[in-house]
Amino acid sequence: MTLLQSLKNFVRSRSIHVSYVDVGSCNGCDIEVLACLSPRYDIEQYGIYVHNNPREADILLVIGAYTPGWEGKLATLWEKIPEPKAAIAIGNCPISGCLFNRPHTYVDPPVAKHIPIAAEVPGCPPRPTEILAAVLAVAPIVFRDFEVKR
Amino acid sequence: MKKTVDVSIPLGPIHPCFKEPARIKCQTSGERVLSAEMELGYMKKGIERIMKGRPWQEVMFLAERVCGICSVIHNMVFIEALEKISVIDVPERAALLRVIVNELDRMQSHTLANFSYCYTIEHETLGMYLLDVREKVMDLLELITGARVTCAYMVPGGVRFDLRPEDARRLSAGIDRIESDVTRFMKMFEGGPLIATRSRGVGILTREVAIEAHTVGPTARGSGMPEIDLRLRHPTYQALGFSPEYREEGDNYARIMVRFQEILQSVRLIRQCLDRLVPGPIRGGGIPGAGEIAYSGEAPRGELTYFLKTDAAGRVLDISIQTPSIMNIEACCHYLIVGATSLADVTSTFVSVDPCIACTER
């Protein structure tokens, strides 16, 4: 890896763009991600910018227990994110299905069956600080050995 | 004007302004919207089917996860339906504590709805102020129930935890601070020239149309229908002398202002409850039994109904949930968005009715 590339990786790991997708949750985790934007937690002071365009994102936050409506769509969305990328599962739902994973349910957890998951934040719902800590822990790993393929 | 469809524009399912996945298909002529259609089905989890055949002890936790924003009212309506079935009395202190927690939940839901609206019309400063107020409300909710979102505070015959005197003092100080903050932000919203341009006269819903479209909650109260508030029929609210807030304009501005007024009203209700709180038991006895009932309560978004059938062991044989958002979303698509002069108004009007897709699809 060239010096320029490693410098680029270092800088980019301190300026992360996050996109989030809800694949069938109860809204609780959604709102806790939204609470990270609030002045109390202030996600932007860590260089994390939340917006909903997967083509500009580095990290995808996956929320929810994967309903049949997302069949194929989540994989397409994952392909739209440029390299390097990582997905973080927020809450119990994408990990195990939480209490939606019972007989007669429509959901199909875990989300790791459909896209690769880099980190998991358990909790129903997790606190905003835990979400923040997970994103900050994953960020340096995403860019560590990245090289532009020519 | 010749009404021909130029282009059909889909908004969503992933959209920066929507908190949850939903798609609006707009048939447009130029920038004018001729008709709109809602496409749902990204969040269907089948929670009613999961609930059937399970004991009430499990269903009360499932009922909370129908909606993560207004989880307290789902818990409250389910538990009160059980109490109505098996004639369980609630001690007075517990009834007042239920009202306190329910109003705190309403406050955080309304601040979130107003944040979303301010964020959508690009007034991010006011949005962030409101999100900060919401964190203060969440602190108070955590102080009483021990959890931020899924509290499970109410149980048949009472509530789970008592309110200690020192916590009551902190709650009282907290709501004073929130009241002064919200009053300030409400004035900002009332007087902001940018907000007036984007909100006044946009998405008008007259009282006649509101009745015809079966709108509920703040959407209906923004169109001059105070009688729609189901808290008028709740015995504890009746004892507190509750009278609903409403406005006559029926536009986006009125819907947001009704929510601001209701936050301040919730503060007054909590203060009244704290004044009336006398030491006493927080849990009466009682075991849920067999029966069948349709019971409604006022959720932050409107009328929430549980149709419930249980057997002698307290198992839920049949359950059906009717949530408020579906009526408001349909009214929004068929009456509010149609005729909008710009696509930017479509998102802001849709957000102003406070849609909750997780509730709608369950």
Image (cartoon, rainbow, N blue to C red):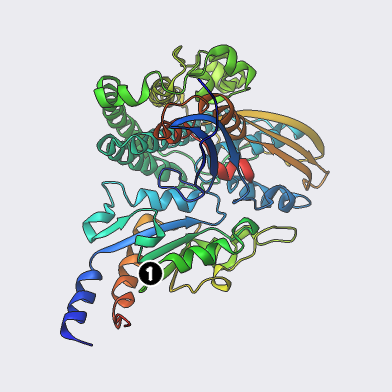
Outermost residue toward the front in this view: B2
Residue B293 locus on image (x, y percent): 77, 32
The count of marks equals: 1
At 43% from the left edge and 68% from the top edge, which residue is drawn? A87
Residue A65 locus on image (x, y percent): 58, 60
Residue B191 locus on image (x, y percent): 25, 20
At 54% from the left edge and 72% from the top edge, which residue is drawn? A112
Question: B219 or A149: nearer the eye?
Answer: A149
Circle 1 crowding by C-alpha within 10 Å: few under 14, some 14–19, many from 20: few
Residue B41 showing in the rendered view: yes
Q: Establish if B134 lies above or below A150.
A: above
Q: Establish if B27 lies above or below A18.
A: above
Say which element carries label 1.
loop
At 62% from the left edge and 19% from the top edge, which residue is drawn? B233
Q: Establish if B67 lies above or below A129.
A: above
Outermost residue toward the bottom in this view: A1
Subunit under mark 1: A
Residue A63 locus on image (x, y percent): 49, 58
Asked if residue B250 lies left or right of residue A56, the reply is: right
Question: B276 or B39: nearer the eye?
Answer: B39
At 50% from the left edge and 16% from the top edge, which residue is drawn? B223
Question: B59 or A103: nearer the eye?
Answer: A103
Question: B51 or A89: nearer the eye?
Answer: A89
Residue A121 showing in the rendered view: no
Mark 1 highlights which residue?
A: A82
The three-letter amino acid code for the residue at tag 1 is Pro
Occupied quadrant, residue B123: top left
